[in-house]
Amino acid sequence: MSELGASFLSGCVHPLHGADHLVAMVAVGIWGAIAGGRAIRVWPIAFVATMLLGFVAAVSGMPVPTVEPAIRVSVVVLGLLVALAVNAPLWIGAAVIAFFAFFHGHVHGTEAASASIAAYAMGLAVATGALHGAGIVLCRAADDSIARAVLRAMGAVAAGGAILATLAWT
């Protein structure tokens, strides 16, 4: 495998190793699908675009002191947004998602140890988009009220799990 291909593959696989990233990405997709309309496209795009800005900031050496706490808070907030099926205006949802995306991107940029940073970032973006898509598919497949209630309960479990993990880390 070429160095470029290995870097792309590393970028794709990296976000799948952390429960915080997995849960937050799927939650973005679910919340966008719950909101419907343009949110189903705009919110995941806002996340990926801003995540890449955070990635570039980290690779460029820009320090951000609150990255890990912000990521834990993102899981709590996104989980609650899903659990409560919050109906936010498009721009507010995009702003909330973009805010957290910067931190997710920054931590991935800090951890990137690839010879080809651009290929790694592209893999990261593809994997993140796929996780958003998984959330959208889960929500779309939940066509009855019981399945939707299960998805919302998953959001509550994610938020609660992140709170408990945060308490355990402190």
Image (cartoon, rainbow, N blue to C red):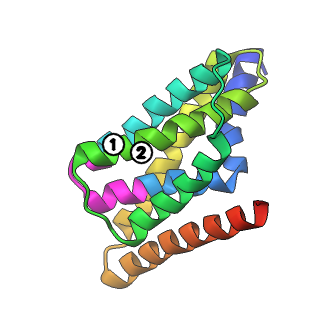
- Viewer-proximal residue among 149 and 20: 20
Image point (76%, 21%), residue name: 114
Which range is magenta? 29-40
Residue bearing the label numbered 1: 94
Q: Is residue 41 above or below residue 146?
A: above
Verify whether residue 159 appears in magenta.
no
Image check: 52 left or right of 67? left
Residue bearing the label numbered 2: 97
Q: Quadrant of residue 108?
A: top right
Image point (25%, 62%), residue name: 87
The amino acid at mark 1 is: Ala
Image point (31%, 64%), residue name: 86
The amino acid at mark 2 is: Ile
Secondary structure under the numbered disc 1 in the rendered image? helix
Image marks 2 and 1: residues in contact by CB distance under 8 Å? yes
Secondary structure under the numbered disc 2 in the rendered image? helix
Circle 2 crowding by C-alpha within 10 Å: few under 14, some 14–19, many from 20: many
Pinpoint residue 116: horizontal percent, then vertical percent: 71, 15
Verify whether residue 35 appears in magenta.
yes
Disc number for residue 84: none
Q: Is residue 148 visible?
A: yes
